[in-house]
Image (cartoon, helix red, strand yellow):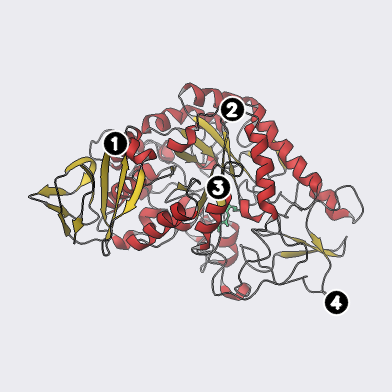
């Protein structure tokens, strides 16, 4: 089918449905609420929305535990509401991407109920089952992302089942072709409803090594973000429980399915240790028969150095010259970037504005997480307010993910800042409510205004969306690269520090687009967290 590849130039706005807009007053967001608030997303300049899971679920992991893959959870609405939402989005020029949590289901899925009941039924081999060691202990040392062993005992089968996340998220057995076929059929169900793409949860976890070898010891927590206490399992290199070679063939099957429809995009979430994540992203997006894009946790980390951002981008471009990355600084799993990077800035607004100037200058597709356009911080919560299972289990060592999941704030003075007429599932607190959309919409110098301006600038710059990328060799704290296409060049410069710095220009240039800097007699002055896009001919050199 003809392809226009809309996703390459896209800014994708992530909506966390529980927390976007509650229109039925039960304290949890819903599809009708999302549809009503979509003009905000369109005005921001986004091209697409990604909806975190909205399918039937016991919500043990807030929807990342699906018990019916082809229906909407009643908390969020109905299939008719979903169709309505797609229509509203399309009218506003927004594409719609849904999350697919295929690696595991909920333990409440009827197939798992059947699978755990006996070793012989038709679904016996649909999940990953293994015998205990002779002493009764789990088959190997594999560890769950959420703490402890990845194996849970099932007395009825007298076997263990694999769960990379919660015990209520049993892993599907991808080595079984029936499982593959069925999962593809659930994707087809949504494709037929007219959506535009998928975000594939934990795409590198689909297959496991069916021989079940122990993972070798390692020096990392499971990933930089989960921070499960070390005592709960031995740190290990996750060689055998994820990212198996068979994964690529399955991605190819998914791709052929999607390619039967018009201009569908698949973006995979790749969680791997350290720099390995960039390698795997590259591998999953190489060529034209795997994923369209992948994103990793690399830029969701606490690291805020020029070297780090350069390694992420240059590493990807080198490792997958024909692949395509997606970059974002925040999502529903990590501390919001304005909070995460706060020691690298003097004030929250400047950091938020620098962040969007950075994002909009990167090669690849850009992701924005609801609320970041307001310069939102993580909400500080006390134990009794928490809902996230790893936090409930390991508090205070693990703070969990509730802080970045509190409701979107719309009207500073309305109850719950306009999110809900009821009691919101997570509290809306003053520091967050103060940054409400209505307040910022009235101010020219707000973070929201900076987001709109930076997104609009990128949209009209082929150098930024499709141009080449060449890094300048500058010391910390300067991140600088040239983006160029046939028509012009921009050198994008960022001062990743809370101090003033300046650079000497080797030739003529002018400030164009978003900037927090001044240019005078060949010197670029960058205030704390300053940034500039410099328009020029050919190659511009900069000296610290
Ligand atoms: O996240 C995958 C993942 O590895 C995360 O667990 C991440 O390490 C962690 O959230 C950081 O605290 C995806 C979803 O984005 C996440 O919300 C789900 O909990 C998880 O898969 C299981 O489906």
Q: The C terminus appears in which quarter of the rendering? A: bottom left
Between disc 3 and disc 2, whose residue precedes? Answer: 2
The single residue placed furthest to the left in the displayed view is 521
Q: Nearer the viewer, mark 3 or mark 4?
A: 3
Category of crowding for the residue at label 4, using alpha-carbon neighbours closer than 10 angstroms: few (below 14), some (14–19), many (at least 20):
few
The residue that disc 4 covers is: 134
Task: Tell me residue 465's x, y (percent).
Answer: 38, 39
Between disc 1 and disc 3, whose residue precedes? Answer: 3
Task: Tell me residue 529's x, y (percent).
Answer: 25, 55
Helix, strand or loop under label 1: helix
Task: Tell me residue 362's x, y (percent).
Answer: 37, 47
Between disc 3 and disc 4, whose residue precedes? Answer: 4
Q: Which of marks 1 and 3 is in front?
A: 3
Category of crowding for the residue at label 3, using alpha-carbon neighbours closer than 10 angstroms: few (below 14), some (14–19), many (at least 20):
many
The circle on residue 453 is 1
Reply above or below: 169 against 288: below
- Quarter occupied by residue 435: top left
The residue that disc 2 covers is: 262
Reply above or below: 87 against 490: above
The reply to whether the C-beta atoms of the residues labelled 2 and 4 are less than 8 Å apart is no
The reply to whether the C-beta atoms of the residues labelled 4 and 1 are less than 8 Å apart is no
The residue that disc 3 covers is: 285
The single residue placed furthest to the bottom in the displayed view is 135
Q: Which of marks 2 and 4 is in front?
A: 2
**Front in this rendered view, residue 281 or 59:** 281
Distance between mark 4 and mark 1 Cα atoms: 64 Å
Between disc 2 and disc 1, whose residue precedes? Answer: 2
Category of crowding for the residue at label 1, using alpha-carbon neighbours closer than 10 angstroms: few (below 14), some (14–19), many (at least 20):
some
Distance between mark 3 and mark 2 Cα atoms: 19 Å
Residue drawn 92% across the image and 53% down it = 120
């Amino acid at each position: 089918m003809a392809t226009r590849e809309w996703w390459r130039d896209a800014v994708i706005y992530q909506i966390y449905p529980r927390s976007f807009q509650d229109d039925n007053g039960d304290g949890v967001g819903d599809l009708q609420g999302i549809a009503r608030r979509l003009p905000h997303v369109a005005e921001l300049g986004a091209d697409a929305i990604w909806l975190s899971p909205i399918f039937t679920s016991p919500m043990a992991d807030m929807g990342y535990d699906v018990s019916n893959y082809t229906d909407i959870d009643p908390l969020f609405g109905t299939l008719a509401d979903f169709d309505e939402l797609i229509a509203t989005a399309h009218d506003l020029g927004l594409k719609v991407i849904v999350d697919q949590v295929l690696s595991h289901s909920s333990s409440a899925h009827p197939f798992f109920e059947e699978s755990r009941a006996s070793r012989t039924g038709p679904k016996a081999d649909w999940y990953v089952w293994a015998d205990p060691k002779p002493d009764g202990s789990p088959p190997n040392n594999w560890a769950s992302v959420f703490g402890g062993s990845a194996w849970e005992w099932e007395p009825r089968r007298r076997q263990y089942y694999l769960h990379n996340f919660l015990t209520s998220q049993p892993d599907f057995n991808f080595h079984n072709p029936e499982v593959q076929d069925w999962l593809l059929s659930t994707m087809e169900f949504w494709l037929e409803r007219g959506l535009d793409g998928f975000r594939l949860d934990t795409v590198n976890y689909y297959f496991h090594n069916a021989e079940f070898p122990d993972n070798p010891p390692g020096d990392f927590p499971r990933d930089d973000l989960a921070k499960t206490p070390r005592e709960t399992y031995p740190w290990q290199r996750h060689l055998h429980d994820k990212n198996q070679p068979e994964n690529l063939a399955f991605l190819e099957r998914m791709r052929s399915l999607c390619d039967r429809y018009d201009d569908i995009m698949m973006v995979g979430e790749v969680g791997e240790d350290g720099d390995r994540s960039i390698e795997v992203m590259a591998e999953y997006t190489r060529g034209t028969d795997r994923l369209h894009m992948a994103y990793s946790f690399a830029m969701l980390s606490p690291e805020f150095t020029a070297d780090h951002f350069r390694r992420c981008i240059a590493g990807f471009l080198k490792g997958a010259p024909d692949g395509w990355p997606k970059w974002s600084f925040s999502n529903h799993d990590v501390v919001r970037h304005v909070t995460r990077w706060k020691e690298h800035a003097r004030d929250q607004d400047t950091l938020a504005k620098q962040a969007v100037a950075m994002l909009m200058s990167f090669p690849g597709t850009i992701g924005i997480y609801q609320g970041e356009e307001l310069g939102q911080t993580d909400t500080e919560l006390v134990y009794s307010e928490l809902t996230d299972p790893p936090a409930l289990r390991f508090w205070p060592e693990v703070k969990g993910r509730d802080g970045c999941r509190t409701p979107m704030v719309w009207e500073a003075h309305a109850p719950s800042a306009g999110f809900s007429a009821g009691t919101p599932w997570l509290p809306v607190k003053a520091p967050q409510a103060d940054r409400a959309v209505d307040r910022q919409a009235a101010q020219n110098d707000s973070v929201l205004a900076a987001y709109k301006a930076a997104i609009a600038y990128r949209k009209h710059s082929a150098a930024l969306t499709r141009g080449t990328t060449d890094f300048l060799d500058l010391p910390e704290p300067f991140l600088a690269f040239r983006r160029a296409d046939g028509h012009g060049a921009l050198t994008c410069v960022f001062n990743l520090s809370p101090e003033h710095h300046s650079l000497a220009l080797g030739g003529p240039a002018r400030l164009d687009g978003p900037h927090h800097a001044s240019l005078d007699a060949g010197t670029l002055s960058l205030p704390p967290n300053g940034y500039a896009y410099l328009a020029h001919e050919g190659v511009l050199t900069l000296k610290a």
